[in-house]
Structures are given as C-alpha cells and as structure tokens.
Amino acid sequence: MKADNSLSDLFDGHGWAHSIANGKLIRTAVKDILAVGPHYKLPSGSTMSGSILERQYEADKTEDNIILGLPGVSKYGLTLMTGGATIQRHPMPQRSVVLRLLLGNYAPQCY
C-alpha cells in the first residue's frame, strides 16, 4: 500500500499521466529494480545524466556500428558535396530544395 502511494505521488508530483504506469519503460524499470533487491541504491540525478547516460550512449554507438557493419560509420548527419563551381546559366539549387529532394518531409526548415 505504501509503495503504491509513493508511486502515485511520484506521478502526481511530476504531472505524469497515470497511464504511463502501463507503459513498457516504467514496468521494465520497476521489474529491474525489484530484481536487484533491497540493497539497490537510486542513483543521483547527476549520475543519471552523466556516467549512466554516457554508458548508454556508448552502447548505442557500438550497436549502431555492428548493425551498419562498417567501422566509423554513423547513422546521424548528412553530407552534401559539390564540385564548387557554379555556371551562371545553371545556378546551383538552393540548399532547401536539395534537402527536400533528398529527405522529403524530414528535411529541416532552411531560412
């Protein structure tokens, strides 16, 4: 009963919808914490936003490199290369046009 009240207070205090309790992330977190047992110590906010986040990032990068199959490859970013010359009769298209052609609806707004 006390644990349920504390969990409800956590959700209410942070303005989280109670339906989040049905989600996979919260269910997995509670399951993993319970599996550790009573000696589990909740990490500080700075630890979560520091070393834990860094460890997760490195694991994701490693997984991405394995999935992509090439060393040094990243799935983030975009590179456009041109010859550097602009012939006046055929000017280079604007950057926003090139991005829209390449990325469709996912292109960022270019101003």
Image (cartoon, rainbow, N blue to C red):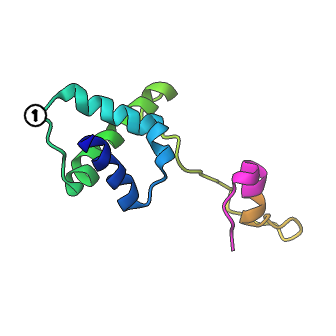
Other-residue count near label 1 (Cα within 10 Å), few / some / many at <14 / 14–19 / ≥20: few
Q: Quadrant of the N terminus?
A: top left
Report the span colored magenta.
99-111
Judged from the image, the secondary structure of the residue bearing numbered disc 1 is loop
In the rendered structure, the answer to whether residue 50 lies left or right of residue 85 reads left
Residue 33: x %, y % from top left: 25, 33
- Picture residue at 25% right of the left edge, 50% below the top: 48
Q: Nearer the viewer, residue 68 or 53?
A: 53
* Residue 72 in magenta stretch: no
**Is any part of residue 73 visible from this angle?**
no
- Picture residue at 49% right of the left edge, 26% below the top: 67
Residue found at the very far front of the displayed protein = 1
Residue 109: x %, y % from top left: 69, 66
Q: Quadrant of residue 45?
A: bottom left
In the rendered structure, the answer to whether residue 81 lies left or right of residue 16 reads right
Circle 1: residue type: His
Count up the numbered dots. Answer: 1
Residue found at the very far left of the displayed protein = 39
- Picture residue at 44% right of the left edge, 41% below the top: 21
Q: Quadrant of the C terminus?
A: bottom right
Residue 77: x %, y % from top left: 55, 50
Q: Nearer the viewer, residue 30 or 84?
A: 30
Q: Which residue is mark 1?
A: 39
**Is any part of residue 76 visible from this angle?**
yes
Q: Nearer the viewer, residue 91 or 16?
A: 16
Establish if 11 lies above or below 66: below
Q: Main secondary structure of the magenta part?
A: helix
Establish if 50 lies above or below 60: below
Residue 79: x %, y % from top left: 59, 51
Establish if 62 lies above or below 47: above
